[in-house]
Image: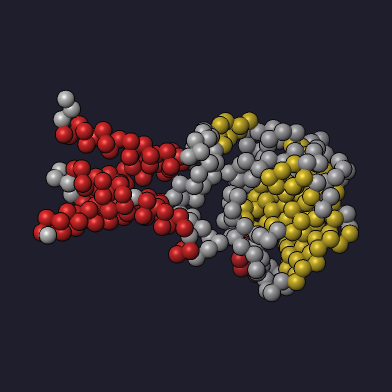
Amino acid sequence: MPSRGQIKILIFIPFLLVYWAVGLYPFTFEPPKHVVNQAERTADGGLSFPAVGIARTSGAPEWLSALQDTSRLELRLVARTDNPDQRGPARLFTISDGVSDRNLTLGQEGADLVIRVRRPGSDANGTPALKLADIFRDADWHEIRVRVEPGRLAVTVDDKARVEQALSGSPFPEWNPEYALAMGNELPYGRAWTGEIRAASVDIDGRTIDVLDPAEIDLPGSWWEMRSFNPWDIDHKRAYYANADIYINFFGFIPFGALLLLLFGRRLSIVHIMLLGAALSLSIETLQILLPRHPSVTDLVLNTLGAGVGAALARMAIRSGASA
């Protein structure tokens, strides 16, 4: 015959499994993988990306820190695709920090050229993006120029004007000078493009930097690739209080704290229950790193507070019932 303590544990275990199931759904395991860089230099000094590969700066380019005093930046890229139906968008060129924060990115989405520029009116991801249809419908070489200056954003492809957009001010105060530059993929990897880049340069107020110069850019031999995440990010697109995730994480752990207090209230204080709530939340958030979920320190804090509030409410209910 099970003891009362064993029965309580048997009651609690299914409850615990439900939290893990909800927190880890849909259970798609994405462990880190070792990737060998397939990028290579061509005989004419360009870059070839026959498969997953990247060419990148070791850190932020030195010229990026001087953009605050810049009146004009022009990117020139001469490239051709290996596949007219690449998705991601697949990155030809990027100055960014992962998939949600960037200064400037050129990518291929199907046969279209997608350009994201952080500018007045855009978010930190450079959206709304500019989309130029059918640039990569063939395997020909195409010269792409992106000119950014206070009050104006212009794009030409093969000497034909494709975008002329007025800006409300200078975009450069919005740019982050600490982002690295990469071609063929994105940092920390995962948006690979296949094709060739014959020329890539950045002109800043008449000073031209050859981005393909081996002194400017490296080809790492390999890397470990894992899904990127921002542990502090809840949702930049909405106000904090408008994010439903906040309420789900807080109120969702109130039953956890209440049940622990009801089952083990004689042995556990509210602080103990909050620590157990934090341990459960930490296990879920840690495992989410390997899943298509978004681990967050904010979730950990809210889960812990929710467990404490649940325990406090349960204690108040017990005391109220005892005094009635």
The one nearer the camera, 222 or 205, is: 222
Q: Is residue 208 above or below residue 260?
A: below
Q: How is the image coloured?
A: secondary structure
Residue 68 is drawn in which quadrant? bottom right
Q: Position of residue 253 (x, y in %)?
A: 34, 50
Q: Is residue 239 above or below residue 217?
A: below
Residue at image point 44% right, 50% down: 296
Q: Count the labels in the image.
A: 0
Outermost residue, left side: 323
Quarter containing the N terminus: top left
Residue at image point 80% right, 38% down: 83
Outermost residue, top side: 1
Q: Position of residue 315 (x, y in %)?
A: 19, 54
Residue 141 is drawn in which quadrant? top right
Residue at image point 79% right, 50% down: 112
One can see residue 60 in this view: no
Q: Position of residue 270 (x, y in %)?
A: 21, 51
Q: Is residue 123 above or below residue 214?
A: below
Residue 70 is drawn in which quadrant? bottom right
Quarter containing the C terminus: bottom left
One can see residue 115 in this view: yes
Residue at image point 84% right, 61% down: 162
Q: Position of residue 205 (x, y in %)?
A: 74, 66
